[in-house]
Amino acid sequence: MFCNQCQEALRNVGCDAMAGVCGKTSETANLQDLLIYTMKGVAYFNQIARQHGINDPKTDRVVLDGLFTTITNANFDDESIMTKIEKGLTKREEIKRQLMVEGLIQKHQLLPDYASWSGHRHTFEEKSEEKRVGLLAGPNEDIRSLRSLVLFGLKGMAAYAEHALNLGFEKSDINAFIERGLLVTEDDEMTGEELTAFVLETGKYGVDVMALLDEANTTRYGHPEMTEVQIGVNSDRPGILVSGHDLKDFEELLEQSKDSGVDIYTHSEMLPANYYPAFKRYDHFKGNYGNAWWKQKEEFESFNGAVLFTTNCIVPPKANYMDRIYTTGSTGYPGFKHIPDRGDGNQKDFSELIEHAKTFPAPTQIEEGSIVGGFAHNQVTQLADQVVDAVKSGAIRKFFVMAGCDGRMKSRDYYTEFAQELPNDTVILTAGCAKYRYNKLQLGEIGGIPRVLDAGQCNDSYSLAVVAMKLKEIFELNDINELPIEYNIAWYEQKAVIVLLALLHLGVKDIKLGPTLPAFLSPNVAKVLVENFGISGMTDVESDLNVMMNA
Ligand code: FS2
Ligand code: SF4
């Protein structure tokens, strides 16, 4: 195996032993590579089908799911990954046959290996070990680095596109771009300059997909609004803890469990579900339990009840709670029960999970009180006058975008300390699970505006960009970088990669990225990002704060 797609890559180079730092085995890592390789084959033929208007919309879901499955901490289940490879191969051959019938390709046309290999379950492992299937394929480290930037960005894009699709929203140009991007990562003719331009174009589609998901979420569930979220338990009924990002799953579970005597709580990235008006009418939706994904071992234990993963981040579990964990969508873990996809027009069936949840004791309270969030673009726009006045009067000197991901590494204590050390006339804008490093610190408020404004999930970083654009307009500035906003972003997995590329596309400069720069950036590619966009790594709290306050 070789995997360097996340921030916890071994020695900040790559995981290459029997298992990754995330717990993914070498076999699973290789099968995930083969799944991506298979999706390239699907993309190869579907691009042609698209050009002739004969692509089947069901293909989009196969490709999105194939990419999403390989995101860090999403799917550790070899059986599930192999089934997806089979599904991809079947789809690829189906499209190929149709293209032949239509006379759009020839029977004996020379095809690249990724579009022509075939195999069965028992040969997948051997195939997956071929160098050309994995991340180390490619002529030189700069090309590999740029291809990785594209591929990892596409993975994040696919995740967001899949959530939007689940809510009935899709854009064919985004799906077409994802296929094009997959093929770009195999194109030996492309120069470094061309690949760099493609990386930046990926950012454009990153903005588009986040805007699409924002539209899907807010159309279905209303605009997130300022909300006080309970973090205690206050109930003696058993609960279901919902993790991940998929709001459609969350809605269906809420509806199906409303009269069951079981309460619903959110965990980690599902916290922002509390901010949506549509979910507030469910009395059995009690609030948020626990913190970011990496604390799940302790928190799932004390929760006592059933847990549902709608997406990443899964941590390999302790044996004592394993039998009460469920996955759905692109996620999977050997030994967890998996709730199948919804058939056309139907809901997923959560009845087994709900029945199972009734058999457990109520959660043990681990925290009490509440936290405040729900500051997505619509809510912030309503506060615009207050915010603008506070900036004009000097009551707010600077905003700090501290969005992104949380993770296990001790070095991430930096973010808690950074938030604590920020002067009282600054406001943190956040989104994603990075917020758990400081959202319970009681940092106070400025004239009624909380000093931590949480927009929502990592994809709601889009909201932060909308707010920045709005402020630029209000203050009549020429450039978004003239605003008193600093970017100190924490990354972990590939959704953070597409968020970063989206910010670069919007022209944001001087982003500080930590706790380490991505292992998949070669020195030359990192240099391009530093020189053109001012990206830098974090150093220590005092120095970074000093530089950013005086920027
Ligand atoms: Fe956090 Fe994990 Fe949101 Fe990431 S819960 S690192 O998936 O996408 O952010
Ligand atoms: Fe290593 Fe991250 Fe890849 Fe897991 S996802 S194998 S921790 S680089």
Image (cartoon, helix red, strand yellow):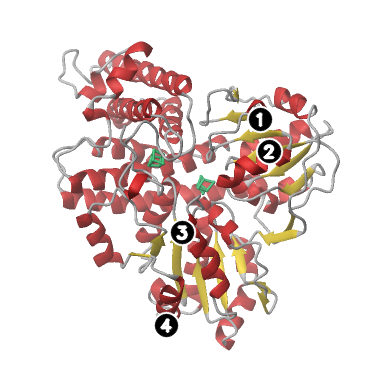
The numbered mark at residue 147 is: none
CB within 8 Å, label 1 to label 2: yes
Left or right of 127? Residue 348 is right
Res 127 quadrant in image: top left
- Evaluate whether residue 227 shows in this view: no
Q: Can you identify the residue that label 4 sits on?
A: 550
Q: What type is the residue that disc 3 sits on?
A: Ser
Q: What type is the residue that disc 1 sits on?
A: Asn
Indicate which disc, 1 or 2, sits on the residue closer to the N terminus: 2
How far apart are the two marked residues, 4 and 1, measured between alpha carbons? 51 Å
Q: Nearer the viewer, mark 4 or mark 3?
A: 3
Rendered position, 204 above or below 35:
below
Q: What type is the residue that disc 2 sits on?
A: Glu
Q: Nearer the viewer, residue 399 or 332?
A: 332
Residue 48, x across and y down, in percent: 27, 28
Left or right of 447? Residue 504 is left
CB within 8 Å, label 4 to label 1: no
Q: Can you identify the residue that label 1 sits on?
A: 320
Indicate which disc, 4 or 1, sits on the residue closer to the N terminus: 1
How far apart are the two marked residues, 4 and 2, measured between alpha carbons? 45 Å
The numbered mark at residue 411 is: 3
Q: Residue at x 62, y 77 (%)?
A: 385
The numbered mark at residue 301 is: 2
Indicate which disc, 3 or 1, sits on the residue closer to the N terminus: 1
